[in-house]
Amino acid sequence: MRVELALAVSLALLLIPLSFIDDIVNPSPHALVYTSEASGQFPSWPHREWYELYSGSLLLHVNDTVTVELRVSGCELRRGVYEYHVVHYSSGKVYAARGEVSALTLLPIFTAELGGVHALQVRVKLEGEGVCEYQLRVTAVRGDKSGYARVYSLEAAVGLISVSAVAAYVAVRRREAA
Amino acid sequence: MKLLKLVKWYLGFFHVWAFSLALFFAYVFTYDRFAILEVSPSWDSLVSGAESLQEPVLMAAHAALVAAVLFSFEEGEGYSYLRHLTGVGRLQVFAAKWLAYLLLTALPLAAARSLLAVSWDYRMLARLGFAQALAKLLAGAALQASYLFPFYAFWALASKRATYFVMGAFLELYLLESLWGGPLLVYRSHLMLLGLPFNPALGWLARDLGARIAASLAHLVAAAYLEARGEVKWR
């Protein structure tokens, strides 16, 4: 009875990788894409300080990508610089990019190398005339999960093989004892 | 030796424990391993990020089934044996049932959520706060289970057969999102205690929470009275 119980529990534990594989194969549509939009006006000119447009944290998994799109309109822009930081919270890994701001700026696409909470920050420093209006769109998209699928399949296979090995051993011992 | 016998008797509820293990897998199945979520960088948000809209109903259904086992088959399940072993009164047995119920219903939920939080980012374990978030989660799950307990305990004690009780409880769960929502709406308290994201479409379910807690307490008193009196006359 005790052996059967142990076998049943370890067989049941196989359900975890199977459930995770199911999340890869049949993803729920609302969990595939995350979008966040921010808009507003810059304070009056001149400002030479860094101005924070977006800061937030997202739970991402390996290969998920984050795209940031910045539109600036309504002002005469002489010069503009953005700084884009992504920090993986638990390991402290930093991804940083810097570039020129134009009317429509596509910031470099960030691809997550580690799973976990990522803190994102976008800030700009602009010089120009008039009132600047900006629109910022952050989109996170689920990336390729075939690596995860392989790992979970391997986990399930190893679990199944070890459970059946123990079961076969128990069966043989019982037959010998009987 | 007596204590050992008690432990052995308690572990003898094998089917109930097995069902709780099954519920653990059901919870894991309702969460999304690869969800992209907006969270704050803390264990709290990771643990409460692992949630689903099916979770409150699953938990209530599980609570109803455990209550049916604990209260509809009192003699059969050996609580009289417990009283014989320890020589305690009926109210203490009621408290013991409540404890067993808490262990059986709150643990699978807490375990499933923390499994997902750990598989999302195990490196967070090096940071502080996991134990605290886990304690908060356990406390929330235990409180939500305790809110449901009096309703199910009373109706399991009062209804004539376990089958009738389970049918009624599941019918109530089925009507949960309709206008005839029944006495125990699970969403609001679940949201407060376990960090379910609030869905505005369920807003009308949120009214009169105080009345619900009062109803829960009234059911608790009634259930304790029935349990203390022993065999219910009309059963």
Image (tube, helix red, strand yellow):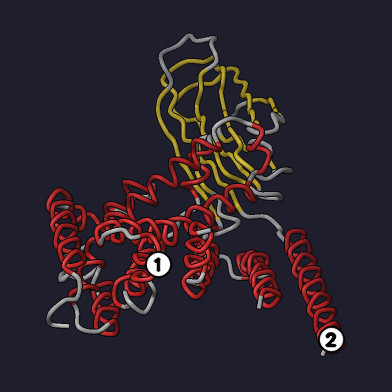
The quarter of the image holding the C terminus of chain A is: bottom right
Chain ID for label 2?
A
Mark 1 is on which residue type?
Leu
* Left or right of B169 on screen, residue B33: right
Where is residue A26? Give x, y as percent. 59, 70
Res. B201 visible in picture: no
Tell me residue B108's x, y (percent): 49, 59
Q: Residues within 10 Å of mark 2 (few under 14, many from 20)?
A: few
Residue A99 as seen in the image, left or right of residue A155: left
Is residue B175 positioned above or below A80 on the image? below
How many numbered dots are placed on residues in this image? Answer: 2
User: Could you tell me which chain the residue with mark 1 belongs to?
Assistant: B
Amino acid found under the numbered disc labelled 2: Ala
Q: Could you say which quadrant of the image residue A146 lies in?
A: bottom right
Looking at the picture, tell me which residue is in the foreground, A97 or A42.
A97
Q: Looking at the picture, does residue B168 appear above or below residue B153?
A: below
Occupied quadrant, residue A48: top right
Res. B35 in view: yes
Which residue is drawn at the image coordinates 16% and 55% (left, top)? B212
Where is mark 2, residue-wise? A177
For the point 64% across and 70% down, the residue is A9
Residue located 34% across and 62% down the image: B97
**Residue matched to label 1:** B58
Q: Could you say whether the residue bearing mark 1 is in a helix, strand or loop? A: helix
| C-alpha distance separating marks 2 and 1 | 45 Å
> Of A129 and B40, which appears nearest the observer?
B40
Residue B67 picture location, percent across and down: 32, 69
